[in-house]
Amino acid sequence: MDLVQLQRQLVEYRTSLYHEGFLDEQFTQLQELQDENNPDFVVEVVSLFFEDSERLLNELTKALEQQSIDFKRVDAHVHQLKGSSSSIGAQRVQKVCIAFRNYCEEQNVEGCLKCLQQVRHEYSLVKTKLESMFQLEQQILSAGGSIPM
Amino acid sequence: MSLLHVFEFGLKVGHLVWMLCCWIASTISMNWFINGEFKDPKAGILGDSGSKMWFKCWDEISNFSFKIHNQYYQFIGSKRVCKSWWRKLLFSWVIGWTLASVWIFCCISSHATEKRKETLASMCDERARMLQDQFNVSMNHIQAMSILISTFHHGKTPSAIDQRTFARYTERTAFERPLTSGVAYAVRVLHSEREQFERQQGWTIKRMYTLEPSPIQEEYAPVIFAQDIVSHVVSLDMLSGKEDCENVLRARRSGKGVLTAPFRLLKTNRLGVILTFAVYKRDLPSNATPNERIQATDGYLGGVFDIESLVEKLLQQLSSKQTILVNVFDTSNQSYPISMYGSNASTDGLEHVSHLNFGDPFRKHEMRCRFKQKPPWPLLAISTSIGILVIALLVGHIFYATVNRIAKVEDDCHKMMVLKKQAEAADVAKSQFLATVSHEIRTPMNGVLGMLDMLMDTDLDVTQLDYVRTAQASGKALVALINEVLDQAKIESGKLELEEVQFDLRAILDDVLSLFSGKSQDKGVELAVYISDRVPEMLIGDPGRFRQIITNLMGNSIKFTEKGHILVTVHLVEEVIDSIEVETECSSKNTLSGFPVADRRQSWKGFRTFGPEGTMHPFSDRINLIVSVEDTGEGIPPEAQPRVFTPFMQVGPSISRTHGGTGIGLSISKCLVGLMNGEIGFVSIPKVGSTFTFTAVFASGSSSSKEYKSQQINNQSNSVSSEFRGMKALVLDPRPVRAKVSTYHIQRLGIHVEVVSDWKQGLSIINRGNNVIHMVLVEQEVWDRDLNSLGLFITNLEKIGHGTPPKVFLLSNSSNSSRENTATGACDLTIISKPLRASMLAASLQRAMGIGNKGNPHDNNVNLKVAAGALKKYRADVVSATRGMEAIELLTPPHQFDACFMDIQMPEMDGFEATRRIRDVEQNINNRIQFGELSADACNNVSNWHVPILAMTADVIQATHEQCLRCGMDGYVSKPFEAEQLYREVSRFFQ
């Protein structure tokens, strides 16, 4: 594919991510932190986020499967998930986390389960989106172009 | 080119005409007024207003003409040429009009003379004709008488007439000849018939004058009949008188009446003439020869005419005898005219001559008429010509004045241009000077301040430290002063322009509040902000400048207030106007702290906005804010009040010594308020307090900017308020104003508030049970007053128990920790220290309500990574530690770290604890160095270890400044990181 077209596609894709609320300006901040000294910064952080999130989601699933649910523990996990998602700017995940924590406060199991579903859903969505974006970037880089900001 | 010249000329002439009109109009009007005023001093209001109107009109006209003048001067250059040209024109104008007026004078006066001559001629001719007619009538009568004699004397034998008959007849018919004083008849007697005749008559023929018997002649003409008046001439021979003889002979030859030259009449001594008619024997044909006539002659009839009375009578008949002088002359002898009538007055001046024909061709008569008076002065001609001359001269003068004025205005304009250029240059120079000087001062001052900062960090004894502190404070004051002076200069030169950006007024006031919170707490002064609900969240204007005004006013207030409170209120102007009648807040008891305050309504007394023509724009885009800053300070002495807004004016020299400051702040504030289309005013009562009020006009943050807002407002506060939404709070406060302020802040978090004045009321509300109260906020005053009953109240609260009991908060005025001890009764009581601010309040509530700040046992790799990345971006070497203990180990001196970013939430040990420990270690080492237990060399030559620790936290909640500081931290950065914020915070420490 044409390089210019690819670049344009990337920009459009990124804009759509912002527009649909998957990402917020925190992600922009993150991108700004990336420079020649630290060329893969965003990818590193994001993959760290993926690892972290998957671990937390598993733990959450485990915790919610138990008979007597330790809500404090659940809340702590959700809080951490919220923190990391807000750090990379995955704001839809973050928003669900807020609701999740409210249910935790109320010790509402059903709500928590529902929220877990939602978080998982949002997480996988943002993951796919981000991965496809990175893929695009990789294509551009391999074609010898630079990534437009 | 020539067309252009013509155009220019047209413009000039037009302008001159216009000026002339204006001038004349003004002169007339002025005269009119002056006269009017002199004549009628009671003209009164009407006249007065009329004159004003006139003057106004005149002003406008002159303004207008001045404008035109200016405009056309844009076109016309080369004024020197114009000037000389104008002089020539002026000169020729004056000369020309002088000549013209002389000519007009001549014209008019000659016309008058001509007319006079004509009048004289016609009058003279009329008189002459009438005289002639009268004379002819009389002559006809004489002739008729001659025919009578020829018929009755000669025609009848014997004669039917004798002397007596004749005398009687003539006497009785004298009325027919009013001008004839007497008639006589002489008969022709030949010498041959003399004796017979003498016998017949009974007397001898006598000579005239001598009365002797006549010598022998060829023939005689003795008078036989005579009117009684002239009866003495009977028997006299008419031929013996030389003149009479000539007359007689001429009359008989010509057959017509013949006149003698005028002579003095014997009796009346008046001038008269004798008319002689010949009486013939028979009717002669008109073409009879003189000889035939002589032969046929029978006698001669003579009549004496009194010419003088004739003319006199005639003139009496005519009306204009007074004006005209008449002379009648016999001019038979051209060289020697004989005057027949009239005085011999000098004959200068106008004279008209009319010829008279008395029927005697041999004698010529003429009438000469003159006006009695000399010709009158030709006043009309004089006045007309002088008038014209005057007008011309006036016009010339106007020309001259105009040209002079034009030249003057040109000169002035030129001068003004030069001055303007100079002034502009001076202004530029001044600005440059100010900019340069301030920059030049600030740059080294930064060095000085920095060095002083560093000096303070070195090992100094108490006195030295004090000196350094003083130096630093002075340096800071100097920089502040320079900035302010620069501001003032900018404002004065009109270079200060306000921004037009969207901002959150409440956030700004919160900021300002936090700025002063430390000071107010130190002083024990209560600080509060209240913003009306009707003030929109987002405004468009200049937040920085607005903040500057507020800071100035609040700074002043806090400087001069030792007890009581400082209250900032923000309302819409409309709101205040609406509520002016019902406003009762200012009654002395009902204030925030209970201290009396100055009535703030007094402070806006003079505002235009509140005047009758208040500028309330109906369109909703403009937001008129009215902001009051009320304090219970020492007030401004009345004598200093008038110069409050004057730059560099302070109440007294001692003020600046005790309180510092330049005295320029209020002046700047006033200017800024002016730039915001507002007004500023104040009221101050010494020993009570001052209230400053200002208005400012902003644009409303439009609805379209809502997205903008939601993006801009930081996420934390949003999430905070959403977390509290729907909750209910109870405020226990007996003071409405303070309760209002508390309510305002709590409501900003989305919490529903109810206010009660004592705890019993509060309890009853909670007991009602239909609405759950989540929190109770108790004012410190209430707390202090009856601690015991409140304790009861709190235990009651716990007993009620609709699920979880409401949390109890104490709204404390100062951060006095002893309060905590007394408060800790049976319940967990949280102290919220004032001034209240939304974020701080939210933090306190959140912490106590257990919404945030859950211990997080795990570190957050993502966040750590991001933080490290952000720091690396600014070329920092980052070492990450995931646990508090690791950090403490790393930061135990000696170490190479410049700063530490401490996450509050760390596993095992939270950030506050870790910080506390690090500080302990540092203190320990410092002490040891100071006491020489440890050599400074061992610790990299640093004698005073204090690594800046910045808290990192996702929520502002946990990181209220105070708490961080209390733990020994130096600042905080909020998560998620904004690189800029991070940089800003860090750079604060590494200037």
Image (tube, coloured by chain):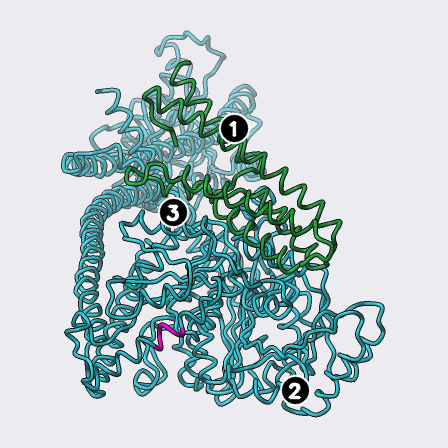
The type of residue carrying mark 3 is: Asn
Quadrant in the rendering for residue B574: bottom right
Which chain appears green? A
Mark seen at residue B141: 1
**Do tags 2 and 1 sit on the same chain?**
yes
Tell me the distance, in whole angstroms, between the alpha carbons under discs 2 and 3: 84 Å
Q: Where does the magenta region start and end?
A: B916-920
Q: Which mark is residue B63?
A: 3
x, y (%) of residue B972?
A: 42, 63
Chain hosting mark 1:
B
Colour applied to chain B: cyan
Question: Which one is closest to the eye, mark 2 or mark 1?
Answer: 2
Q: Is residue B152 shown above or below B848?
A: above
- Identify which residue, B685 or B883, lies in the foreground: B883
State the image quarter where residue B777 is shown: bottom right
The spot of residue B487 in percent (x, y) is 32, 62
Q: Amino acid at mark 1?
A: His
Nearer mark to the viewer, of 1 and 3? 3
Residue B918 lies in the magenta-colored region: yes
- The percent position of residue B499, horizontal first and vertical second, equals 42, 51
Question: Circle 2 sits on which residue?
Answer: B825
Q: Residues within 10 Å of mark 2 (few under 14, many from 20)?
A: few
Separation of marks 1 and 3 at Cα, in angstroms: 90 Å
